[in-house]
Image (spheres, helix red, strand yellow):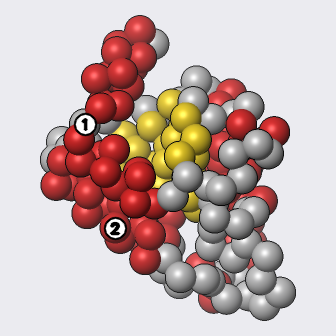
Amino acid sequence: MKIFISGVMQGVRLDNQIGDQSYRTRITAAVKEHMPSAEVLDPWTMHPDSVAYDDAKAKETFHDLVHMAGTVDLLFAYIPRMSMGTAMEMWEANQAGVYIIAVTPHAHHWAIKHTSDEVLPDLETLLKMIGNGRFQSEIEERIAKK
């Protein structure tokens, strides 16, 4: 199973810096512990120096990551606040039939509600869900039907 971690990197920042990415570490650790055969694709791990990219490399990276979001089996979208990049990754994944679990307090926002298979209220709920394995069989069944 391939899992893409989508989430706020810049969000509503007005500078070119990246916000706290510790949620990615926590999600990756939970997946590795409870789903050891899964492959985790994490844009932050793949491009830790992305804020230093020139415009050409940044554009190529952005488009590659959005495309990649549509090639996986499962996408976790961590959106405690709005993120245009995450929205685009979710759209690409949704169009490709990827199972999407959004983690957000914005459960009634149409762009989230209507592109996600599940909407969870917070990161702790997602981590518990990964730990108890409830969704794994559902996703594996969906993947098998593709």
Image quarter in which the C terminus is found: top left
For image coordinates 62% across by 83% down, the residue present is 18
For image coordinates 40% across by 60% down, the residue present is 124
**Residue placed most toward the observer, 99 or 126:** 126
Q: Secondary structure at mark 2?
A: helix
Above-or-below relation of 146 to 86: above
- Labels 1 and 2 touching (C-beta < 8 A): no
Q: Secondary structure at mark 1?
A: loop
Quadrant in which residue 127 is drawn: bottom left
Percent across and percent down for residue 67 are: 62, 44
Residue beneath label 1, please? 133
Q: Is residue 54 left or right of residue 64?
A: right
Residue 58's label in the rendered image is none
For image coordinates 81% across by 39% down, the residue present is 110
Amino acid of disc 2 = Arg
Percent across and percent down for residue 94 are: 65, 31
**Residue placed most toward the observer, 97 or 131:** 131
* Count of picture labels: 2
Image quarter in which the N terminus is found: top left
Q: Is residue 34 left or right of residue 75?
A: left
| Residue 24 in sight in this render | yes
Residue beneath label 2, please? 26
